[in-house]
Image (tube, grey):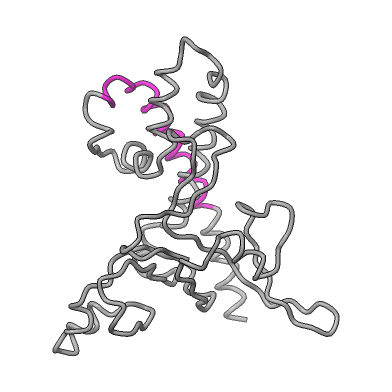
């Protein structure tokens, strides 16, 4: 599910863990697996989404209602295309003259011409660049490291009045996934995570950068073993 760029709204929920700088969890797209489940004599569409429904899978309609989808675009795609990236669909995609150019700009999802210049989530198979660049492992390592940072560094200080500025800076650094990836994963900077900010917190950045890469290596090993099992089963 994703909003088009014509809307300034984001999917928003209150941040109960108090890690976000603005007290809310905001994101522009949301993905979850949908299964057809036989219940008695009927087949129901069920969604597994622990982030929104931690106790159990829920009916498809219940999931849609939670996300208030009347102003959202929602898509159902084949399970093999489960990696995703949000991007613009430019007019050039529909105006390309040559077959080569069409192939370059063509998304995995075929959209009507009126959808040009809208934000859409493009879906990928776990192969080629996504496999070689370890997209899944990096995502898992980012999530695990951010949780560790929150539990160890932020949570104990949440109610400390003398550490308000420190907690706020930590939230800006870790409570925003783009800032987190910029600092810990990419060794980079942006307007919030500038040289002065990173110099100020260089020790803790170094500490959690090492934790991130340790987690990344662990997930790389785990998924490599799973891939070996999949390949072995396919060759039998």
Q: Is residue 103 above or below residue 66?
A: below
Query: Residue 159 versus residue 228: which sits nearer the camera?
Result: 159
Give the prevailing secondary structure in the magenta stretch: helix
Q: Residue at x 36, y 37 (%)?
A: 184
Where residue 167 appears, as percent x and y from the top left, is 45, 22
Q: Is residue 95 above or below residue 13?
A: below
Q: Is residue 27 above or below residue 156?
A: below
| Residue 24 included in the magenta stretch of the image | no
Question: Magenta span covers which residues?
Answer: 197-221
Q: Residue at x 47, y 53 (%)?
A: 137
In the image as oriented, which residue stretches furthest toward the left? 97
Where residue 132 appears, as percent x and y from the top left, is 37, 62
In the picture, measured across the screen, residue 178 lies left or right of residue 161, that is left
Q: Is residue 130 above or below residue 44?
A: above
Where residue 179 appears, as percent x and y from the top left, is 34, 39
Query: Residue 83 versus residue 86: which sits nearer the camera?
Result: 86
Dividing the picture into quadrants, the one containing residue 206 is top left
Query: Residue 218 versus residue 85: which sits nearer the camera?
Result: 85
| Residue 212 included in the magenta stretch of the image | yes
């Amino acid at each position: 599910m994703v909003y088009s760029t014509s809307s300034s709204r984001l999917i928003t929920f209150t941040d109960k863990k108090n890690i976000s700088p603005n007290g809310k969890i905001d994101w522009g797209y949301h993905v979850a697996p949908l299964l057809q489940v036989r219940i008695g004599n009927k087949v129901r569409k069920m969604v597994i989404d622990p982030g929104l429904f931690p106790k159990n899978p829920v009916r498809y309609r219940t999931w849609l209602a939670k996300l208030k989808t009347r102003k959202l675009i929602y898509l159902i795609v084949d399970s093999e295309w489960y990696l995703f990236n949000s991007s613009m669909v430019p007019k050039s995609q529909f105006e390309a003259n040559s077959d080569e150019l069409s192939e370059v700009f063509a998304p995995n999802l075929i959209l009507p011409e009126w959808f040009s210049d809208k934000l859409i989530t493009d879906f990928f198979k776990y192969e080629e660049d996504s496999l070689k660049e370890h997209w899944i492992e990096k995502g898992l390592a980012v999530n695990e490291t951010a949780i560790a940072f929150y539990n160890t560094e932020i949570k104990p200080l949440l109610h400390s009045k003398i550490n308000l500025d420190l907690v706020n800076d930590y939230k800006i650094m870790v409570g925003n996934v783009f800032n987190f990836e910029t600092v810990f994963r990419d060794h980079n900077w942006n307007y919030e995570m500038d040289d002065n900010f990173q110099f100020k917190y260089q020790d803790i950045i170094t500490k959690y950068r090492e934790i991130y890469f340790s987690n990344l290596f662990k997930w790389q090993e785990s998924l490599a073993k799973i891939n070996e099992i999949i390949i072995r089963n396919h060759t039998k």
